[in-house]
Amino acid sequence: MELIKPGTRILCLSPHPDDVEFGLGAMLHKYKGIYEGKLIVFSDRSTTRGEAHNERDQRLSAQILGFREDQVLFIDQLGLEIDRMQIRFFGAEENRDRIRMIVSFVARDFEPTLIFTPGLHETMQDHQALSEEVVRIVSGQASIFGYEVPRSNRRFQPNVFVDVSEADLDAKIQALTCFTEFTNRYYFGSDNIRALARVRALNAGYSGYAEAFELYRMIVGP
């Protein structure tokens, strides 16, 4: 069974630049050219780490995985007069209100088939707050999956596995190298990315590579 079929509309929600690449970069590359995608990014690291090129790097990275430039939007580019969120403050009540407004607007406008958001049990508060609101408010015909960002996910329990190839992993690693101001972190290492993909394939019961997801809701169409 293929998770993504021709015409599938994929909404990827990224609290920070690079989260989607970590969580489903190889899968996105596997189905490159098949899906219609939209990537929404909620913050950048300009104030917390002084990174000046997050937007440029995010667009270059997403292009490797199959997104056109117009399919990658930061929340201040949605026409809702909402600024990019400050890192580590997503859980504040006023920001939860903003998250609900943004997710509701994008879901109505884009009408996704599949929504990918960070895992619900993340220790990173920004990831957790976003995912809680997505699962709470999204209705309609969209299936919802949680993706894995290993550095901040201690309780990830995947029940959906997508087989990916060596070439897909290479593209994922290449996409992550686009983040030129943040590649000195150990979890960007290609060996770590490949090792996790092997473990997830073993979890699924075969030898190879896989990306893994938590299924929160599945809508089965015709």
Image (cartoon, rainbow, N blue to C red):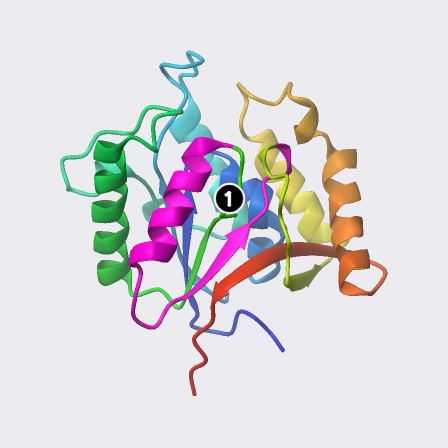
Camera-nearest residue between 174 and 150: 150
Disc 1 crowd, CA 10 A, few/some/many (<14, 14-19, 20+): many
> Which image quadrant for residue 139?
bottom left
At a point 15% along the width and 41% down the height, the residue shown is 80
Camera-nearest residue between 31 and 150: 150
Name of the residue lying farthest toward the bottom = 222
- Viewer can see residue 16: no
Percent position of residue 106, x then y: 26, 54
Percent position of residue 70, x then y: 32, 47
At a point 51% along the width and 38% down the height, the residue shown is 19
- Viewer can see residue 43: yes
> Which residue is labeled 1 in the image?
20
Percent position of residue 104, x then y: 24, 54
Q: Is residue 221 left or right of residue 103?
A: right
> Which image quadrant for residue 193?
top right
The residue segment tinted magenta is: 124-151
Q: Is residue 150 left or right of residue 208?
A: left
Q: State whether residue 176 is above or below residue 24.
A: above
At a point 53% along the width and 69% down the height, the residue shown is 4
Name of the residue lying farthest toward the right = 207
